Image (cartoon, rainbow, N blue to C red):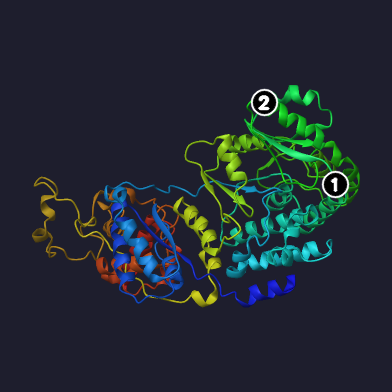
Amino acid sequence: ATASAWTARLRRTATGPSVGVFTVSANTPEALRRNLAVQADAVARRPRGDAATLCWNSNLVKTGLPYRAAFTARDTTELAAVLRAAADDERLRAGIADRAVHPPTIGFLFSGQGIQEPGMTSGLYRDCASYRHHLDSADEALAAHLHGSVRDLILAEDPAVHRTGWAQPALFAVGYALFRTLGDLGIEPDAVLGHSVGEFAAAVAAGALRMEDAARLVARRAALMDALPDGGGMLAVHAGPDDLVEPLADEPHVTVAAVNGPADTVLSGGTDGLDRIAAHLREQGVRTRRLRVSHAFHSPLMAPALDRFAEEAAGIDAGTPRIPMASTRYGHMLGDRPLDAGYWKEQAARPVLFAEALDDLMAETMPACLVEIGPGPQLVQLAERAGLPTGVRLLLPVPGREATARDFAETVATLYRAGAEPRWQALYEPARRTAEHLAPYAFATEHAFWQPAPRTPDQHPDRTPEATGIPAGAPAEVPDEAPAGEAGENDPVLGAVIEAIVEVGEYPPERVGRQTRLHADLGFDSVMIMQLKDRIEHRLPRTEGVTVQQLLPALRSVGSLADFLSDWISVGART
């Protein structure tokens, strides 16, 4: 089959991801465990079938609370099993769970040459409409400067993808499509870093290069390098650059091409010189490995191609990053330096200072998650070997050649558990985004948070049910009725609102006060608002005529909602 036939075949078999992400969140570990168990039981009662629609509906309900669980599943049987296993987890039973206080800071690491594989991301292309769209867009931009389709080459599993003329455009296309697909899901980087050719897609993500300009530069860079005479090579060495000063001094045609870690250096240059250095280092017990490359990248042997490349780059709009970008040319954050023709020429000629750039990115932006934007594990492995602060998550949306939409969804699930707020609809085909009944949220039964604490005899002795003439347990109705708890001592409507909010969200009472914001502080969503309306009407029957549309402008804070309801009750009392 031709390359274009492979692409057409993948499009014909595209059915959208049958996998989804099922989400559950709660305000306490116990509430999370209880609701995982409820959902596990409910899903287990269903016949075996696709789980994506259930997952989609779970994403719409009560997702913004601090204790979170998220799982991928292809069918209801698998989903019930993972929910049950999570509910039975010993740590969760002991009340131990990670708490997502705020969205995580995210760094995107864009892979460099060497990680490309025939057929890379073909499963994601088949199953994910968003990725398909963005890879097609990158392919269209590159096609104007290539003799063929890089997308078709990738999907046809053509080994020519290892040739420099194709490898660099292919990696750019994949990197661009991946970061744009994550962006469709609301996952945006707070900082970016690219390794060698990966820096072009990183610059697009940072807003420093237009995608069309980057595509032209990558295509020309690849073609010019590919046209150089074969010869030269590269050698990975398990040693730092300071340990290589002596052997390099005797080999003027070999240079440091990349510093990937404290003991992770790549040399580049003439093959004879590399062989002599490798033999010398092996005698000293230093591990070395020849890399499978066609040319000596990031060495003086690239010089004949770089002057012409600089001429090509002179016509681009040289921008500066709009988000923090670490430069592997300089080994530190780029700041407001423009990515002009001179930069791109030097970037190809000089060593890749990955380790220094990563150190500066970590120090300046302190990301909680590092996501590799490429077709496999390259930079996350380098980062792990270089050493990272405790707790930093390393994520791989595409862990290898056979990766699928499920692998991609696992990354989104992990980011959600860490505190991210994805736009879930981009994960599902429209046919999956239909209403499906889920088991309702299970509230605590062992203690009703909304009931006021028992009073001692000397506390308000005149406000017993008998003294007020109000039956015990009756709902509050007018502003002289007894409030719930301290926050509503002088404002019964505020007390009733707080009681209702505590019940709906199962929050500790001390967390909810007059200034508390329902959306920003408590994570209220549309379903919780409907539940809140019902519970307020139970406590304040004179508010039954209030519509959701009338409530919405008042939902800025607990106090603004209470004020609106007080006004409503007062107006009703006068009419």
* Discs 1/2, front: 2
Residue 450 marker: none
The residue at 8%/60% (across/down) is: 466
The residue at 64%/35% (across/down) is: 355
Give the camera-side residue of 569 and 164: 164
Residue 230 marker: 1
Query: Horizontal and vertical percent for residue 268?
Result: 77, 37
Residue 211 placement: quadrant: bottom right
The residue at 42%/49% (across/down) is: 100
> Which amino acid, by three-letter code, is at mark 1?
Asp
Left or right of residue 222: residue 37: left
Give the camera-side residue of 472 and 171: 171
Give the camera-side residue of 170 and 545: 170
Q: Is residue 436 above or below residue 148?
A: below
Quadrant position of the C terminus in the picture: bottom left
Q: Earlier in the sequence, mark 1 or mark 2?
A: 1
Residue 245 placement: quadrant: top right
Q: Is residue 483 above or below residue 470?
A: above
Q: Which residue is mark 2?
A: 283
Near mark 1 (Cα within 10 A), the count class, few <14, some 14-19 or many ≥20, is few
Query: Horizontal and vertical percent for residue 538?
Result: 25, 69
The residue at 61%/34% (across/down) is: 359
Query: Horizontal and vertical percent for residue 21?
Result: 46, 63
